[in-house]
Amino acid sequence: MDPLALLQEAEARFRGRVEPVRLEGAERETWSGLGFRLGALRLAAPLAEVAEILEPPRLTRVPHTKPWLLGVGNVRGTLLPVVDLHGLLYDTPTPPGPRRRVIAAEHGDLRAGLLVEEAYGMVHFPEEERAAVLPALGDAVRPYLVRAYWHEGGYWGVVSVRALLASERFLNVAG
């Protein structure tokens, strides 16, 4: 018998013995995204708008650009412009630290990395924790804020990375 047939037979036997597991509260509707920290803000981005999370790559500066465009890095053979998100939104650089990460995102033909202070990974919010009105998380984030959740004693703002990448502020990189 060939190896594929053996695996298929084993899977069929296994499925016949195992009963489906029903998780408590599985019927609750949740929103999932990528959580990250920007200064004191806890934010999240929709998973559909994030390609991957990276360690900050080695960067080559691009002359005559705004200081928040940190440079261009080579990520598996693809050039990735890396933007300091705190610098872009608040005109002050992201503080150095071991938890800094780059969130790679795409919008149409545009691909960019956003340097953040920390990436938490996947976050899940029950829909009943969704804020009825958007909280005041600051003028810099407001144009990109699409929803928010009150979770574990504080607000998490959900930002549209696509809206950020399409914004005039982001596209105006010439220094």
Image (tube, grey):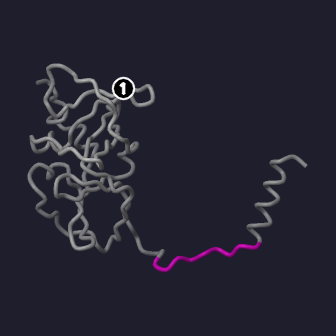
Q: Residue 89 appears at what percent x and percent y?
A: 13, 44
Looking at the picture, does residue 139 appear above or below residue 112? below
Q: Which residue is mark 1?
A: 79
Looking at the picture, does residue 38 appear above or below residue 84? below
Q: Secondary structure at mark 1?
A: strand
Please give the range of residues in magenta.
17-25
Looking at the picture, does residue 86 appear above or below residue 16? above
Q: Is residue 158 left or right of residue 55?
A: left
Query: Residue 26 versus residue 58: which sits nearer the camera?
Result: 58
Q: Is residue 8 left or right of residue 67?
A: right
Mark 1 Cα-neighbour bin, 10 Å: few <14, some 14–19, many ≥20: some
Q: Is residue 64 left or right of residue 16?
A: left
Residue depicted at x 29% and y 28%: 59
Query: Residue 120 versus residue 11: which sits nearer the camera?
Result: 120
Residue 94 located within the stretch drawn in magenta:
no
Q: Residue 165 appears at what percent x and percent y?
A: 25, 38
User: What quarter of the picture does the C terminus occupy?
Assistant: top left
Q: How would you classify the magenta stretch by its main secondary structure?
A: loop
Residue depicted at x 52% and y 76%: 23
Q: Residue 161 appears at what percent x and percent y?
A: 27, 45
Q: What amino acid is at disc 1?
A: Leu
Residue depicted at x 25% and y 56%: 43
Q: Residue 150 appears at what percent x and percent y?
A: 24, 70
Q: Is residue 7 left or right of residue 86?
A: right
Residue at the far bottom in the pictured view: 24
Q: How many marks?
A: 1
Residue 23 located within the stretch drawn in magenta:
yes
The image quadrant of residue 76 is top left
Residue depicted at x 35% and y 71%: 126
Residue at the far top in the pictured view: 63
